[in-house]
Every structure is written in structure tokens, then in C-alpha cells.
Amino acid sequence: MYAATARSADVTVAAVDLGSNSFHLVVATTQGHYVVPLVQLKQTIALSSGIRDGKISLCTLEKVLHCLTEYSAIIAQYRPDRVLAVGTAAFRELPAAAYAFELQRVFPWHTMILSGEEEAKWVYQALAPEIPNRNLGHIVLDIGGGSTECTYGWQSHYGAGCSLNLGCLTLQKYVPWAQARTLVGYERLYTRCAAAYSTVVPQFPTAEGLWMSEGIGKRLSKALGGVLQFSRAVLDRWILRQLQGCKQYAYSVLDALTWYGAIILQATVHQLGIEHIHITSRALRHGIVERLISSAVVGNTDSAAVEHTKATERRWQAIPTTTPIRLPLL
């Protein structure tokens, strides 16, 4: 969300978040002061799991190409004013030129690969509209499949950020799921996560709370009974109960992403001294959409990066439109 700007007509944009685990497509249009999603799709690719030594497996590559072919066809139906696909951690592992031709063949739209620092800043700006505008600093956390982005800011201002090689899929390579819920496996995972923060702690002053993006955040919320705010103590007790085999406040079958994500979050709040955790309804893809809308209005991406965090006049709404295609979020 960002300050409304005078313009002659509403704009339509398409954003693709090429994550290490899932690919998200959002097609949205503006209607007055509202951003209206027309298409919201998700496909689980597990790209990070399919990469070894900078090479992608044939099976995973086929999934990528099939997904982008489908997304490209959907985007073409809407003829958007702006289109952008953004690659994150898993794409940083691949040689830039190795698969460019294959991707361009099925997805002819502009694609950019964010560095770890860029991804951290983009995530912060995407989540900033849901963070209370108070003087005290706060942490924004995005736990992904290939990496974790951790940033510090205050009053919607980005302060410092980093990208850590801690993702739900990367940790699964380190400690397989079969051992992850044993005490030994948990200790190995927690120790690895905590060690990753050794260089981060000095960068971040005291923060009043932590705000998570909705991906892993939504899974943890469901596992904890649907709460959107909880304390570090609640998280610690839930993890202990899982290690003891207790099923209360958990999925009937706990999935790997939730468990690895919980351990990353636990290490984060303990190392940074955070007591309170908040789950937001936003993620990187929302920020990409807003950047594209701002660039269409303002005329350049640099101005858009500042413009969309100034205020919250334009809000996301699922209001009826005359668009012929309304696809559900999968």
C-alpha cells in the first residue's frame, strides 16, 4: 500500500514471485484507492530441493517451465501495463546464463534476480504497511524455502537487513525430515540457525517485536490454533510439545515446512531478544505488485520504491469487478 497519485486511468499489473519453494502469480488492477486482485495462483515447485552444485535436475526444470508457460498464458489474457518476475534464493544458486534461454522461451516477460540484500529490503517494504507506525524499532522476517531475510526498521523506514542461508528446504538437506523431530536433530538445526545470527545481532538495535510474512507465518498460525500474535514462550512450549510427541495445537500430521520454519523463528527471536511475534497477511508478491503500480503511475521504479511506503491510502480489496476470469488462491 502506498500514497495515491493522480493519474488518468487505472492500471493493471502482473507480478510473479519465483520463490525457492513456490511460484506465485498475482494479477491486480487499481480501482480508485483500491488494489483489486484478479488472479492469485500458487504452484509448489521445490526449486531449491532440485538444485545441486549449481545445476537443476531435469524433473525440476520441467516443473519450472510448465508453471511459467501456464503463468505466461494467463498474463497474456489480461494485457497488463507492467509485468515483472522476481527470482530469489534458489535462482541465486544458478548460473545466470545457464537457463536464461529456456526461461525466456516460455516466459517472455521481464525477469530479475534479487541479491540477498535486495530481497531483504523488498520484503521489508512489502510488509511495512501492516506494522504500527511507532518510534520503537521492529524486526521483519521472511522465512523462505532457500533463505531467510531478516531486517530492522522503524516507522516504516528500512534500517538494516541481511539474507541468511537458512531456508526450510536448505535445512532439510542438512538434517533430513526423518531425524528433524528427534532431540538430536532439533539441537543440530537450532545450533546451525543460532550460529547464522552471530554476525547479525550487532547490526540490529533493540526491537519491540517481530513481524513475519504470511507464508511460513500462516502455517505456524494454524499450528498454534489460528493465533496471529503470540509470545516467544508460547513458541518454545509448542516446539517442546512436538519433541515430546504431543499433538495438541498442531496439524494432525506436522509438515516439514512448518517444523523447520518454527526452528528458524525460534532461533531468530532468541538471538535477537524478541518477545512478541506478529503474523502479517503480506508477502514479497504484494510489494512487487505495488512497485509495478507505482512505476506505472510515477514513471520510474526508484520513485516507486519510496512512494509505496509513504502512506496507506490505497488498500487491497477483493471487491467485485467485471473481469471475466476470477481464479482462486490455491
Image: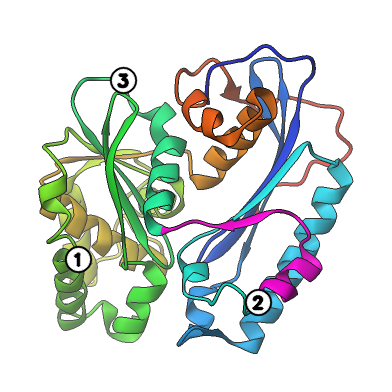
Q: Which span is picked out in magenta?
A: 100-115
Q: Position of residue 181 (x, y in %)?
A: 26, 77
* 281 within the magenta span: no
Q: Tell which tag, 2 or 3, sits nearer the viewer.
A: 2
Tell which of 33 and 118 is nearer to you.
118
Q: Amino acid at mark 1?
A: Ala
- The residue singled out by tag 2 in the image is 99
Q: Are marks 2 and 3 in contact (CB under 8 Å)?
A: no
Label annotation for residue 43: none
Q: Residues within 10 Å of mark 2 (few under 14, many from 20)?
A: few
Q: Secondary structure at mark 1?
A: helix
Q: Is residue 321 left or right of residue 53?
A: right
User: Which residue corresponds to the image point at 19% horizontal and 75% vertical from the top-left?
Assistant: 186
- The residue singled out by tag 1 in the image is 196
- The residue singled out by tag 3 in the image is 133
Q: Quadrant of residue 57?
A: bottom right
User: Which residue corresponds to the image point at 71% horizontal and 80% vertical from the top-left?
Assistant: 62
